[in-house]
Image: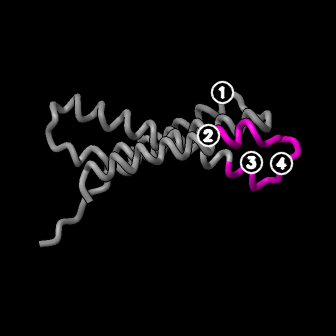
């Protein structure tokens, strides 16, 4: 698949997930809704943030690298934006259940930094 198709899919995901998230935000009562509605709310929120942050990171990396090797920036941008979106979603969830404090946020951020460092340190095996 070409880069334009990936970017179009990303923009379509942003629009659809934001629409679903807004629909759940304004129509679901969190005190009377079943648990699957709450899970769906957080999943659409995470998907929206992942897609939006991916698009922003991708264009920032393309701009910063002077448009060199554009396609290589997409996969790391998706991974890094997923980590940021998971952190923000977990922060929102912990705030909902009223257990959020700065220790939890610090542990989440450190965990995601370590995960990113693990991905960056992996050596790719080249098949000859």
User: Of callouts 3 and 4, which one flags the residue occurring earlier in the amino acid sequence?
Assistant: 4
Relative to residue 79, is residue 55 depicted above or below? above
| Residues at marks 4 and 1 touching, judged by CB atoms closer than 8 Å | no
Q: Element at badge 1?
A: helix
Please state which of the two labelled residues, at mark 2 or mark 3, is closer to the viewer: 3
- The residue that label 4 is drawn on is 33
Q: Element at badge 3?
A: helix
User: Of callouts 1 and 2, which one flags the residue occurring earlier in the amino acid sequence?
Assistant: 2
| Residues at marks 1 and 3 touching, judged by CB atoms closer than 8 Å | no
Disc number for residue 102: 1
Which residue lies at the image location 22% right of the left edge and 48% below the top edge? 71
Mark-to-mark CA distance, 1 and 3: 24 Å
Q: Is residue 22 magenta?
A: yes
Disc number for residue 89: 2
- The residue that label 3 is drawn on is 38
Relative to residue 65, is residue 117 depicted above or below? below
User: Of callouts 2 and 3, which one flags the residue occurring earlier in the amino acid sequence?
Assistant: 3
| Residues at marks 3 and 4 touching, judged by CB atoms closer than 8 Å | yes
User: Of callouts 1 and 3, which one flags the residue occurring earlier in the amino acid sequence?
Assistant: 3
Q: Which quadrant of the rendered structure holds the N terminus? A: bottom left
Query: Residue 3, image x and y in percent?
Result: 25, 50
Q: Element at badge 2?
A: helix
Please state which of the two labelled residues, at mark 2 or mark 4, is closer to the viewer: 4
User: Of callouts 4 and 1, which one flags the residue occurring earlier in the amino acid sequence?
Assistant: 4
Mark-to-mark CA distance, 2 and 3: 12 Å
Say few, some or many: other residues with alpha carbon within 10 Å of mark 3 (under 14 / 14 to 19 / 20 or more). Answer: some
Query: Residue 5, image x and y in percent?
Result: 30, 52
Foreground of the two, 65 or 104: 65
| Residue range highlighted in magenta | 21-40
Which residue lies at the image location 60% right of the left edge and 47% below the top edge? 44
């Amino acid at each position: 698949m070409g880069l334009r198709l990936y970017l179009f899919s990303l923009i379509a995901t942003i629009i659809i997930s934001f629409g679903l998230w807004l629909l759940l935000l304004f129509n679901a009562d969190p005190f009377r809704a079943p648990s699957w509605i709450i899970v769906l709310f957080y999943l659409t929120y995470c998907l929206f943030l992942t897609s939006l942050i991916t698009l922003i990171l991708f264009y920032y990396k393309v701009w910063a690298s002077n448009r060199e090797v554009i396609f290589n920036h997409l996969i790391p941008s998706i991974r890094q934006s997923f980590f940021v979106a998971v952190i923000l979603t977990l922060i929102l969830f912990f705030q909902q259940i009223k257990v959020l404090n700065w220790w939890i946020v610090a542990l989440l951020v450190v965990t995601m930094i370590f995960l990113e460092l693990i991905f960056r340190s992996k050596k790719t095996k080249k098949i000859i």
